[in-house]
Image (cartoon, rainbow, N blue to C red):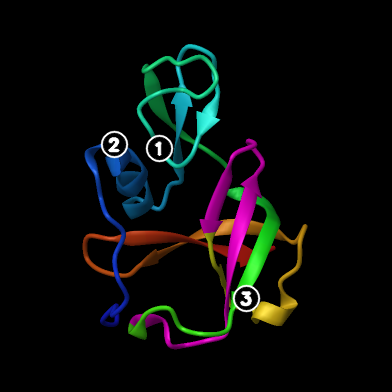
Amino acid sequence: MSQYSKPLPAMTPGSSGFWEGCQRHQLLIQRCRSCGTFRHYPHPMCPNCNSTDAEWTPVSGQGKVYSMTVVQHPTHPAFADVPYAVVIVELEEGMRMVGDVVDTKPEEIYIGMPVTVVFDDVTEDVTLPRFKKL
């Protein structure tokens, strides 16, 4: 594992299940126990039925690029390796996640491109979900 120099995500009590799953290389998404709605990014109340009863559910990690943008100018010194693409992936289960696509040049990424989650152990305590072209 090389030294990771970019900012790390904020780990909160409400998102701990997501990050613990990533550390085990398993994509876990909150799912409402009352109505079955998946929700990401994690939050305390279901947007569909207002229930606060949720569980962390394993999902496939497969989906398609829903939207994307290519960053041309660094917004932070740690992200000086431009250009890079930021994507929104719509997972098979219906929810969307923001991320990046590894091993693919920004100009090769397209809307509808099939992807799957991969996990990047950036520190001993933090594993980031990223996406890889199928």
Q: Residue furthest top?
A: 34
Residue at image mark 3:
70
Residue 12's image quarter? top left
Please name the amino acid that badge 2 sits on: Gly
- The magenta stretch is 78-98
Work out which quarter of the rendered image holds the N terminus and state it: bottom left
Dot 1 surroundings within 10 Å: few (below 14), some, or many (20 or more)?
some
Q: Does residue 92 belong to the magenta stretch?
A: yes
**85 relative position to 80: left or right:** right
**Could you tell me the amino acid type at mark 1?**
Pro
Q: Is residue 34 above or below residue 100?
A: above
> Is 75 on the left-hand or right-hand side of 101?
left
What amino acid is found at the position of numbered circle 3 in the picture? Val
The residue singled out by tag 1 in the image is 42
- Relative to residue 127, is residue 33 depicted above or below? above
Q: Determine which quarter of the picture holds residue 17.
A: top left
CA distance for labels 1 and 3: 26 Å
For this rendering, which residue is in front, 105 or 12? 12
- Residue 14: mark in rendering: 2
Instruction: Name the residue nearer the viewer: 34 or 47.
Output: 47
Question: Do tag 3 and tag 2 residues touch (Cβ < 8 Å)?
Answer: no
Label 1 close to label 2 by CB (< 8 Å)? yes
